[in-house]
Amino acid sequence: MNYRNEIIRLLGRLDLEKHLALLSSNTFQAGLDALDPDCPCFVQDRAIQECVYLGLRYQVLMA
């Protein structure tokens, strides 16, 4: 599973205000970067990726 794509898919379900609020959050953006293989801060460890994914997913679901 590509965790980053799953988070982006979940963001699409939010209304625009909540969507933009999350994308403007530095911590949320850092989490997305950690899951992006093209980003220099990409996390290689699968267990850490899952932890980051679950944290981002929680933020989206609680928005």
Image: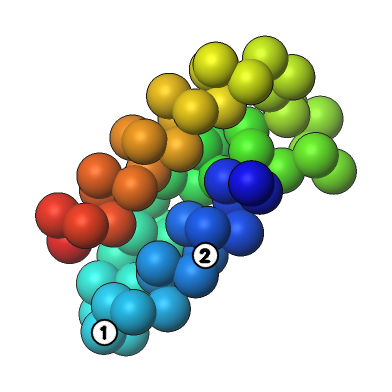
The kind of residue tagged 2 is Ile
Classify 59 as above or below 61.
Answer: above
The reply to whether discs 2 and 1 touch (Cβ–Cβ < 8 Å) is no
Q: Position of residue 3 (x, y in %)?
A: 57, 46
Residue located 26% across and 48% down the image: 59
- Residue identifier under label 1: 15
Indicate left or right for 61 with 38 as reference.
left
Secondary structure of the residue carrying tag 2 is helix
Q: Which circle's residue, 2 or 1, is located before the other in the chain? A: 2
Secondary structure of the residue carrying tag 1 is loop
| Residue 9 seen in the figure | yes
The kind of residue tagged 1 is Asp
Q: Which mark is residue 8?
A: 2
Classify 27 as above or below 9.
Answer: above
* Foreground residue among 5 and 39: 5
Residue located 49% across and 28% down the image: 50
Q: Where is residue 63 in the image (x, y as percent from the top left)?
A: 17, 61
